[in-house]
């Protein structure tokens, strides 16, 4: 965990203020993580452990306890190699992308108690290795990357429901015009609902799609609105990594700042970046 320098700045300290680690943490190949909307909980997807671990913030020490307050695991949970986890911004819901079962599972929680059994499961024959998840700020849309089928699935929340989403996607971004090559992560713009997608292979690694008028009922253009907004992150060291690790040589994580003014990505190079 890294602390921000100053109250209004966008610069963070380079030395971590504290870490969650050790056997007591139950971490096992932590692949993704998500803060609850109020910041009191942190959920971590552990791919090799087949478990979601949840940690609680100690308000007095301003850090998170290393021992999870809850875990989601076991046969009933249907957690299978979780690659992504995300809290809903409007409801007590946790969504998980399971690489091992090609499914998105949903769990409810109240306070520190988390359900170990999913209340909804989304599957689709074209959803292969879901790698990234994100909700829009209003919780009306949920998007998921499909790493091995080069697609992005978009689901809509059912009106007047308790956290239920459409069984079938309202839209699938796919085809050559998307320039997708093993899409990995995605993030919705907090103000305009634009959708940014990262790809872990290829030269055109970051793609930004515009949702007309920011209306959740409006589908996204199947190609980025402006080709200039396809950001290329590529250098000579990436070529070496592509030879060694197919499908893993490009951009990984992606995030948009709450004010919508900054886009951050992680890139898998021969040296850390």
Image (cartoon, grey):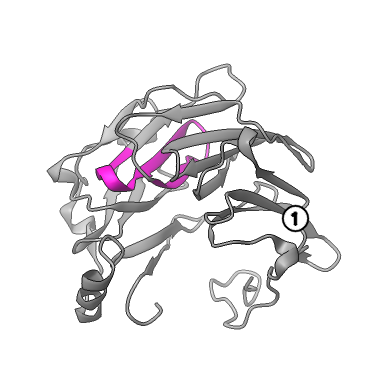
Relative to the observer, which residue lies in front, 252 or 194? 252
For the question of whether residue 234 can be seen, the reply is: no
Residue that carries the numbered disc 1 in the rendered image:
68
Q: Residue 85, relative to residue 160: is it above or below?
A: below
Which secondary structure type mostly characterizes the magenta part of the structure?
A: strand
Q: Position of residue 260 (x, y in %)?
A: 45, 55
**Range of the magenta residues?**
130-152
Could you say where residue 42 lies in the image, as x and y percent from the top left?
A: 67, 54
Relative to 245, is 27 on the left or the right? right
Question: Residue 211 appears at what percent x and percent y?
Answer: 32, 37
- What residue is shown at x 78% (from left), y 51% (from top)? 69
Q: Which element carries disc 1, helix, strand or loop? A: loop
Spot occupied by residue 241 in the image (x, y as percentages of width and height)? 26, 74
Residue 185 visible somewhere in the drawing: yes
Q: What residue is rendered at 68% in x and 70% in y? A: 21
Q: Residue at x 53, y 34 (%)?
A: 105
Classify 180 as above or below 139: below
**Residue lying furthest right:** 60
């Amino acid at each position: 965990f890294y602390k921000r320098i100053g109250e209004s700045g966008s610069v963070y300290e380079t030395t971590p203020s504290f870490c969650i680690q050790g056997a007591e943490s139950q971490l096992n190949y932590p692949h993704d993580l998500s803060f609850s909307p109020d910041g009191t909980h942190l959920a971590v997807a552990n791919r090799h452990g087949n478990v979601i671990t949840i940690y609680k913030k100690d308000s007095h020490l301003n850090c998170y306890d290393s021992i999870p307050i809850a875990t989601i695991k076991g046969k009933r949970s249907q957690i299978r190699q979780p690659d992504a986890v995300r809290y809903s911004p409007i409801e007590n819901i946790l969504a998980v992308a399971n690489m091992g079962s090609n499914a998105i599972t949903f769990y409810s929680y109240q306070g520190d108690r988390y359900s170990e059994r999913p209340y909804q499961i989304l599957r689709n024959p074209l959803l292969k290795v879901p790698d990234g998840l994100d909700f829009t700020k209003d919780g009306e849309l949920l998007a998921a990357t499909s790493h091995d089928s080069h697609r992005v699935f978009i689901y809509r929340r059912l009106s007047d429901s308790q956290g239920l989403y459409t069984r079938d996607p309202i839209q699938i971004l796919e085809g050559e015009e998307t320039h997708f090559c093993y899409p990995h992560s995605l993030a919705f713009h907090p103000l305009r609902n634009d959708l940014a997608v990262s790809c872990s292979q290829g030269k055109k690694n970051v793609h930004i799609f515009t949702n007309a008028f920011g209306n959740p009922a409006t589908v996204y253009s199947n190609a980025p609105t402006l080709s200039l907004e396809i950001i290329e992150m590529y250098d000579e060291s990436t070529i070496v990594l592509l030879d060694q690790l197919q499908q893993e040589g490009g951009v990984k994580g992606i995030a948009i700042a709450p004010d919508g003014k900054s886009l951050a990505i992680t890139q898998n190079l021969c040296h850390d970046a």
